[in-house]
Amino acid sequence: MADISVTDIGKAFGENVILEHINLEIQPGQHVGLVGANGTGKTSLFRMLSGEWEPDGGSIHIARGRRVGLLAQLPRFSPGATVEDVLRGAFAEREALADQLRDLEGKMTSGTADDEDLRRYGELQSRFEASGGYNSDVELAKVAAGLDITHLLPREFERISGGEQTRANLARLILADTDILLLDEPTNHLDIRSVEWLEDYLSSCRSTVIIVSHDRWFLDRTVSRIIELEFHTATVWEGNYSAYAMQKEQRLADQEKRWEQEQREIARLSHTAARMHGWGMGNSKLQKRAFALDKRIERLRQTKKVRRDNVVYKGGFKDAEESGEEVLELHGLTKAFGDHVLFTEAEGFVRKGESVAILGDNGTGKTTLLKILLGDEVSDAGKVRWGANIRKAYLPQVVHFDNEALTVLDTLCTALKLTPPSGRNRLAAYHFTGDDVFKPVSALSGGEKSRLALCILMFSEINVLILDEPTNHLDIRSREWLESALEEYEGTLIFVSHDRYFVRRFATKIWQLEGGQITEFPDGYERYEAVRRAAPAVPVKAEPAKEKKEKTVSADAEAKRNLKADRKRLAAVEREIAALEAKTAENVKRQELAAYDAAALMEALAEAEELSAALAPLYDEWAELSERIPEELQ
């Protein structure tokens, strides 16, 4: 029996429809990722699943006896409750058993216990042991350490930050061991080490888990099914996030090809039908054939053009004069706040064109290091030396503008000294179109403000770009847009990020802040992760292992064999297409010659359909092969 059954539910706020006709079944123990652009209804669906909201129609059934825990909800706790009190609230059932056991122990000590008390004590003790009651302290310590909240345990829950409260609540839910776990952005406010701990926990968790997250790497490691909310409805995809992304792109590409083929077929059939209507005057058989073609055309026209809800970067970067080869050097850099030392005599070097990711646990000084690089913070000792001809720009984690009452268009035109038409063209490349350009900046979301700031920065002829958590608070669609924009950037990139998908895509070098030092890993994120897991904080040489070279050679040989086979098949397909297109040209002539011979025309039209059916799969195969083979080798 399913843990969660959703039947034909919908949700709207006034005329704004969020969800409609949603049907889902989630089986016990499944780990599901819920994805979709901001505003597609992920949080609304969560609140309905948890019972906080009622759907406008349809029904939601939770299996009897299954307990639901929702991360997004922060329960109220008694004034003065510490973080440890909050976490121990997860053991309420165990504590109730412990209280009963203590009462019975008191009776046994005083000699007032009867046989029923002894029987009851044995039963409660078995239940207490089965519930893990004797391991409560160990479990609490383990989870607190994993989520890096051990230092928060004695502090009052109400006096810690929102991010710290979220981490504490996540720990409480994990300790409560609920049957159905609803996690809304669980990796927010977690550093990479804590996220990895959570991934390891979820991989062995037997509860049913539904996760809303924009962290694609996290989804890849924690879920085996994706539910996508798009255009008010839900689509289920098997596999993790990467599998879903590949399947969806392939499905959309197939649908687009099919739609384009149908449009070509509609044009061909419409031309033929028009001629047959003209020729069929007084010929009932030909008229029937023409009306049959009309019906076929109408059926083809019912196919809708593919809708894509993705945003692709289509702008450009203003060329900047190149910097010198030596972009940045850190020498003996030291910084502390009171007794809290962030780094001591740290060293680092950045060359032109490198992309450096600064990683480290929360509190190790990543953002402080960026501020020192920008001159907004002063180091206690050491030097920061920028190279020759450096033009740098900074995109902070939270973007603010000096006058947020201005419209998007006025803000851009003022910053870049552009005319309104030029400003609108520039904004369109960054997906501010229509009435969006007249919105006040104060009405923009965090992601939209980042996009506007990037639009201004990239027009400023920069050759060093510094980013602080650029993907924070962005949905997956916006993250992919940002990534496609940065792919066009050819300068030097220095950034802080906990988004491992982003780091893996862009980092050519890792700086790990740990133990007051910068440890450099020169070969990107995957190499850094492998070395760190084996022996943390030990730099490695860039030379690949011998076995890796042999595998690369083998892979290269296989790729060459596949390319050779594809080129051979492409030539064969082109010959087949050419032969059938020649026959099609001859068929068109036959149709023209048979203009006044109904029987010959019917025969020619039947042959035309056979030729069209034979050509369609060949065109598909030709397109697929052409995509795989580099243009210069075709």
Image (tube, rainbow, N blue to C red):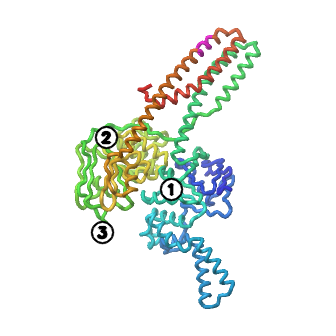
Residue at the location (69% across, 16% down)?
A: 276
- From the image, state whether disc 2 or disc 3 is nearer to you: 3
Identify the image quadrant of residue 368. Answer: bottom left
Q: What residue would you read off at disc 1? A: 185
Mark 2 or mark 3, earlier in chain: 3
Please tell me whether residue 584 belongs to the stretch shown in magenta.
yes
Badge 3 crowding class, 10 Å Cα cut-off, few under 14, some 14 to 19, many 20 or more, is: few
Mark 2 to mark 3: distance in Å? Answer: 41 Å
Closer to us: 174 or 412: 174
Instruction: Tell me the residue that label 2 is attached to.
Output: 461
* 154 sits left or right of 257 in the view: left
At label 2, the amino acid type is Glu
Dominant secondary structure, magenta:
helix
Instruction: Look at the image and give the residue range highlighted in magenta.
Output: 583-589
| 307 vs 67: above or below | above
Q: Is residue 503 left or right of residue 238?
A: left
Estimate how packed mark 1 is, as few (under 14), some (14 to 19) or many (20 or more) residues with alpha carbons within 10 Å.
some
**Amino acid type, callout 3:** Asp
Q: On the image, numbered disc 3 is attached to which residue? A: 339
Q: Please tell me whether mark 2 sits on a helix, a strand or a loop.
A: loop
Which of 156/111 is in front?
A: 111
Viewer-side residue, 548 vs 481: 548
